[in-house]
Image (tube, rainbow, N blue to C red):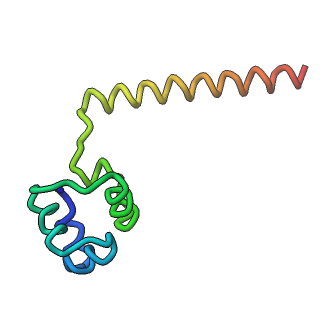
Amino acid sequence: MIRLKELRELHNESQKDIAKLCKVSKQTVLNWENGIHEPKIDILILLADHYRVTVDYLIGHNISVENKAKMIDDLNNEFSKVVDRYWAIFDSKNR
């Protein structure tokens, strides 16, 4: 797993600490860090919560610049709709 070792070392934790947290062997943690095996989703969620990161971050997923721009546009459009609805309700109550 791409960022597990980085996060573990940043938090001064050993592979044994992570093995205990995840209820697996130290060898399993080593295999995750070396990309030999991947943890199941419940373990990914546990680790993401433990390190206060997203699962996407933990597995090294990066959003492209184009996708970020599209997400921002979508959020702006949704925000505009919410504001328009708010003002419509506000105007109807103040007539």
Residue at 76% from the left image edge and 20% from the top image edge:
88
Q: Is residue 48 above or below residue 77?
A: below
Residue 64 location in percent, x, y? 23, 33
Residue 27 location in percent, x, y? 14, 72
Residue at 32% from the left image edge and 72% from the top image edge:
23
Residue 68 location in percent, x, y? 32, 33
Q: Is residue 24 above or below residue 12?
A: above
Residue 59 location in percent, x, y? 23, 51
Q: Quadrant of the N terminus?
A: bottom left
Image quarter of residue 50: bottom left
Compare residues 67 and 44 and report the one nearer the observer.
44
Q: Left or right: 49 with respect to 3? A: right
**Count of numbered tags:** 0
Image quarter of residue 30: bottom left
Compare residues 38 and 64 and report the one nearer the observer.
38
Residue at 18% from the left image edge and 75% from the top image edge:
26
Q: Quadrant of the C terminus?
A: top right
Q: Is residue 75 above or below residue 11?
A: above
Query: Looking at the image, which residue sits at the far right?
Result: 95
Q: Left or right: 11 with respect to 94? A: left
Residue at 32% from the left image edge and 56% from the top image edge:
44
Image quarter of residue 91: top right
Compare residues 54 and 94 and report the one nearer the observer.
54
Q: Left or right: 45 with respect to 24? A: right
